[in-house]
Amino acid sequence: MPAGRRLHLGTTPHSRGLLPSFDPAASHSAFRAKGGCHDTGLPRLARASGPGRYNRQPGDCRMIRRLLAGTLVASIPMLTRTLVTAAAPADCATLVSLTIPDVTINAATTVAPGSFTPPGAQTAMTLPGFCRVEATARPTSDSEIKVEVWIPPAEAWNGKFQGVGNGGYQGSISYTAMATALRRGYATASTDTGHTGDDVRFGQGHPEKVIDYGHRAVHVMTEAAKLVIRNASGRFAERSYFVGCSAGGHQALSEAQRYPGDYDGIVAGAPANNRIRQTFGFLASWIATHDAAGAPLLTPAKLALLTRSATAACDANDGLKDGLIDDPRRCTFDPATLACKAGADETSCLSAPQVAAVQRMYEGTKSPKTGALIYTGWPRGSEAFGETANQGWRQYVTDPKEPSRVGVFKYFLFHNPSWDFRTIDWDRDLAYAEQQLPHLAAVDTNLAPFKQRGGKLLVYMGWADPVVPPQTAVAYYDGVVKTMGGLASTQDFYRLFMAPGMGHCSGGPGPNQFDAVAALEQWVEKGVAPNQLIATHSTGGKVDRSRPLCAYPKVARYKGAGSTDDAANFTCVAPPAPPAPRPR
């Protein structure tokens, strides 16, 4: 098959055009409504409308029609044989001989129910039995994308497929997420995104690997997994879902934007969907919170002081004293109120440089020349809290010897390991980065192709996220609302849920455990759109609080009677007036 010409396979109703039982007459209108190749039953490749989108070449549908007519059988016999004649379920071990363009099946083994220890893991997990397929995809000569696909036995399979995302710049298979999907009866897949480990040096001199990481690896994984599942089970998955948080949230939004035909439903948690500007934000935060010699200005104790003080100042903004900041945009806490007075104990106050550093963290990254906002600030109340180390600023501002992810500048952008971050030109280098690295951004607000194919998108975000500022999720949603013709039109297919007191992906003092996948299944499969998600908070394994997370822009408000720790005593209402201006 010529380079760049890849068959884009949808879920079962869209893909059966390659199977002997396909009835084009009966299915024509359904495929047409979903933007498919009208006389083949196959979806068109994703339309291109921005940098880094997957471009559908003219004639892709003609090529598919020729394939189905048999005129290309001689040139790609293995692909035809794989798709058309493998109608019966295959024994797991035989999948090693499966032929997929640009993909090599390295191993196919049956894993018995019980204990399974993932490669590199120290702890075993208990899993039902499954067929484990390990593969390598090479869509370009410089690609080396590892993929795993797990398929339950027929009697345990729910008939659906779930792709799972990664975290950070993670170059490893997401085994824990795959295990969660498998236990729910899904066939599931994950990729290492084309590199090993979290070190971004893989991008030095390898632009194709950066594209693989940015979005291509997940798409290639998805296409390969659908074919593996079809050959293992004898049928395509009835529905396809993608679930990811943080970098996985970026992958999720990228799928909706670049490859709208890949998934019927997508869960995007805490989406780091503008990795370019986020990296500029990390750099600015480090500079703001370190002195000229590189020593940190803030300590963990001072961060804890800030969280306590901000919460005390803004807890009651929603009419309820519950230890949570309902919406940090409405919090006007000023760190200058903690400024040390003469003779004060400095453990309970902030020095002038510390006050200035915190103010810059809240205000965000701005152009020194124009004052224009480059990246939004971190929310009040996110400074230091929660059960894990990453639920606060300290990993970015108190310990590191250099800015977080500075390697993106060194190895992805300037290809210079010796690059000195102190030489940055904020305006010039940002413009250059956005030109050179569009694959690290998933910010296109035109989701019309995803909506038109019937896709559903559920996004969630913690209002106290210290890694990806929650304002970014709100700003993206508001942008989609504007592009897609209003709130009602957007809520037909896309809903956003903001969680007060929740950190990055989970954790924090607010309710932060909820079943987004179940809500998405109801929406995709039964047409029941989620107006709220019931979230819980646990201490010592025991649930001690529940709250509804309302579909944005609505917010949860106490009804006035009953326990404030019981979600049943809250209702979702329209939001209050716009936030008050921030102090400058």
Image (cartoon, rainbow, N blue to C red):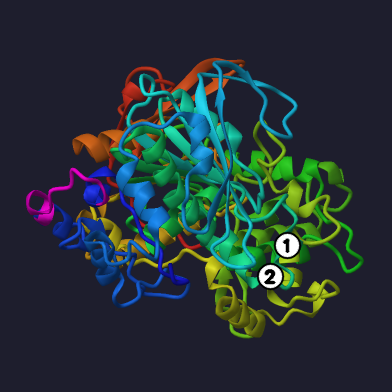
Tally of marks: 2
CA distance separating discs 2 and 1: 7 Å
> Label 1, on which residue?
202
To which quarter of the image does residue 563 belong? top left
Query: Disc 2 vs disc 1: Cβ atoms closer than 8 Å?
Result: yes
To which quarter of the image does residue 404 belong? bottom right
> Label 2, on which residue?
206
Q: Is 25 inside the magenta-drawn segment?
A: yes
| Image coords of residue 141 (percent x, y) | 62, 68
Mark 2, Cα crowd under 10 Å, few <14 / some 14-19 / many 20+, is some
- The foreground one among 6 and 319 is 6
Give the answer, above or below, for where 155 lies relative to 405: above
Give the answer, above or below, for where 317 lies relative to 284: above
Q: Amino acid at mark 1?
A: Phe
| Image coords of residue 453 (percent x, y) | 24, 55
Give the answer, above or below, for where 560 lies relative to 528: above
At horizontal 35% and vertical 35% (from top left) the residue drawn is 160
- The foreground one among 333 and 533 is 533
